[in-house]
Image (tube, rainbow, N blue to C red):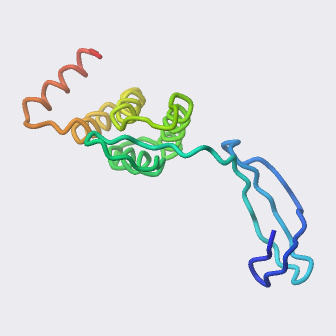
Amino acid sequence: MRCPACGYADSRVLDSRPTQDGLAIRRRRECPKCLRRFTTYERIEEAPLLVVKQDGRREGFDRQKILHGLMTACEKRPVPMARLTAIADDVARAAHDESDGEVASRWIGEQVMQRLKEVDEVAYVRFASVYRAFADAERFREEVERLTRREP
């Protein structure tokens, strides 16, 4: 591994350990030339996953988009960031496991809503209102009533 400070082409590993989520290895390294220490991460390279949008466009899967949507839905709600990260990781893992290289955006949204409903009902309604693009207040009211009756 090339040193980021002096560019020397070699470094030695001082310490290796798995990250908290277990999906990467964190390595502390030291450059033998300038003695600077730095950290690198080793991750599994997954096959690219494409998201098929409702209009037929395809774009690369981005876990950060899921996390951003969750954070927006949970703004000013008592949902810990660790829980939102876990939901985003869970949906990303499921998308990679369940797909053959492509996954529908509708499937991703449904997966997020299903998990969010178990965590915070207000955040669920917020997410659903954007995701399902409620046309009017009546449709919004129907969703809230369905939630209070515990219907699927």
Q: Please give the name of the residue rendered at 88% of the width and 79% of the height, measured from the top-left corner.
A: 35
Q: Quadrant of residue 130?
A: top left
Q: Please give the name of the residue rendered at 81% of the width and 50% of the height, measured from the top-left corner.
A: 17
Q: Point out residue 103 in the picture as x, y percentages from the top left corner.
A: 43, 35
In this view, the residue in front, 134 or 120, is 134
Q: Please give the name of the residue rendered at 29% of the width and 17% of the height, measured from the top-left corner.
A: 152
Seen in the picture, residue 20 relative to 122 is either above or below; the reply is: below
Seen in the picture, residue 6 relative to 9 is either above or below; the reply is: below
- Is 99 displayed left or right of 147 in the figure? right
Q: Point out residue 149 in the picture as x, y percentages from the top left corner.
A: 23, 15
- Is 103 displayed left or right of 39 in the figure? left
Q: Please give the name of the residue rendered at 88% of the width and 62% of the height, measured from the top-left corner.
A: 13
Q: Point out residue 147 in the picture as x, y percentages from the top left corner.
A: 25, 22
Q: Number of labelled discs? A: 0
Q: Quadrant of residue 151?
A: top left
- Is 9 displayed left or right of 118 in the figure? right
In this view, the residue in front, 73 or 65, is 65
- Is 51 displayed left or right of 49 in the figure? left
In this view, the residue in front, 142 or 51, is 51
Quarter of the image with the N terminus in it: bottom right
Q: Point out residue 77 in the picture as x, y percentages from the top left corner.
A: 35, 43
